[in-house]
């Protein structure tokens, strides 16, 4: 994608050969978030009563507002209270993607999320993350849901069990292939959705700025801000859903086992 001057061009040539443009702005976004988190943490530590919000708008208020209404409430609704231990994981996605998206609206900056390498990297982190969480919550039993509902041989006698062996093998192979395709498509879908929306948004804003300098660019900047927020929220929300699905299999089995003794 062709664009005008960016701060990346001020880097020495040696650094440009080592760091791509999208990587440079991803590093900038990360450093800004670390600095912002430092100020928010310091404001919280200096507060006489941390349970009371600050009177003036600052890093702490913004962080608490976004965490409570955007991250925590969604996590509670999708995963439940048990999912609060993963709030930092979800919040990292939301804040990084939001800032990366908004950087595309600033002069001299390029949104890291407008590059497929960045969005694919984020999607792979989400993919690896929810699978690790599933294994952490359930252990090796997490892998059972890849094999479908039929994981044992029905019947009482040996002959009846042997008769169901071909059915079991077909079922396991079918659901294994189906689940692998389903899970494998998730990072592809996440990365392409975020990349396509941010690249398209950046192109539209650039095109209309070239046509006029007055009212129309302002409207598209507002639209670009809205798109940036929505895309960060959608990515985080889908990551929450994937974690909820990974965790729910184990919880469903536990509830099922607990319900059986009650019938005796």
Image (cartoon, rainbow, N blue to C red):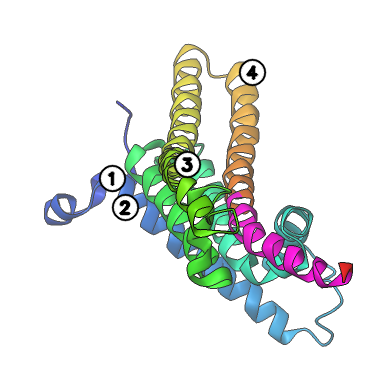
How far from the left and from the top, in percent, is residue 77? Answer: 79, 54
Which residue occupies 11% across, 55% down? 14
Residue on which the image places disc 3: 167
Measured in 3D between alpha carbons, the distance from the residue under mark 4 to the one under mark 1, in whole angstroms, is 30 Å
Depth check: 159 or 69 in front?
159
How far from the left and from the top, in percent, is residue 206? Answer: 45, 23
Q: Earlier in the sequence, mark 4 or mark 3?
A: 3
The residue tagged with tag 4: helix, strand or loop?
helix
Residue on which the image places disc 2: 24
Q: Is residue 248 magenta?
A: yes
How far from the left and from the top, in percent, is residue 72? Answer: 74, 61
Residue on which the image places disc 1: 21
Label 2 near label 4: C-beta < 8 Å?
Answer: no
Which residue occupies 58% across, 31% down? 224
Q: In the image, is 261 to the left or to the right of 223? A: right
Q: In the image as oriented, which residue stretches furthest toward the top?
A: 211
Q: Earlier in the sequence, mark 4 or mark 2?
A: 2
How far from the left and from the top, in percent, is residue 160? Answer: 53, 51
Measured in 3D between alpha carbons, the distance from the residue under mark 3 to the one under mark 1, in whole angstroms, is 53 Å
Nearest to the eye among marks 4 and 1: give it. Answer: 1
Label 1 near label 2: C-beta < 8 Å?
Answer: yes
Query: Visible in this render: residue 79?
Result: yes
Label 3 near label 2: C-beta < 8 Å?
Answer: no
Q: Earlier in the sequence, mark 3 or mark 1?
A: 1
Measured in 3D between alpha carbons, the distance from the residue under mark 2 to the one under mark 1, in whole angstroms, is 5 Å
Nearest to the eye among marks 2 and 3: give it. Answer: 3
Residue on which the image places disc 4: 215
Q: Earlier in the sequence, mark 2 or mark 3?
A: 2
The magenta region covers 242-262
Q: Earlier in the sequence, mark 4 or mark 1?
A: 1
Which residue occupies 49% across, 36% down? 194
Q: Residues within 10 Å of mark 2 (few under 14, many from 20)?
A: some
């Amino acid at each position: 994608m062709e664009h005008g001057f960016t701060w990346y061009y001020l880097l020495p040539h040696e650094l440009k050969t080592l760091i791509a443009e999208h990587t440079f702005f991803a590093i900038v976004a990360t450093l800004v978030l670390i600095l912002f988190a430092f100020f928010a943490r310091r404001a919280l530590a200096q507060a006489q009563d941390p349970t009371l919000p600050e009177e003036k708008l600052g890093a702490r208020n913004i962080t608490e507002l976004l965490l409570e209404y955007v991250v925590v409430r969604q996590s509670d609704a999708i995963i439940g209270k048990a999912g609060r231990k993963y709030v930092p994981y979800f919040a990292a996605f939301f804040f990084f993607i939001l800032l990366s998206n908004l950087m595309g609206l600033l002069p001299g900056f390029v949104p890291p999320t407008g590059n497929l390498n960045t969005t694919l990297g984020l999607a792979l982190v989400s993919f690896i993350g929810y699978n690790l969480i599933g294994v952490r919550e359930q252990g090796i039993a997490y892998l059972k849901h890849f094999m479908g509902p039929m994981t044992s041989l029905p019947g009482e006698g040996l002959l009846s069990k042997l008769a169901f062996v071909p059915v079991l093998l077909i079922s396991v192979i079918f659901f294994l292939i189906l689940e692998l395709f389903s899970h494998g498509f998730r990072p592809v879908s996440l990365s392409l959705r975020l990349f396509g929306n941010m690249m398209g948004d950046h192109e539209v804003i650039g095109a209309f700025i070239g046509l006029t300098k007055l009212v129309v660019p302002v409207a598209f900047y507002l639209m670009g801000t809205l798109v940036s927020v929505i895309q960060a929220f959608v990515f985080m929300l889908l990551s929450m859903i994937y974690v909820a699905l990974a965790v729910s299999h184990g919880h469903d089995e536990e509830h099922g086992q607990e319900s059986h003794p009650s019938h005796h």
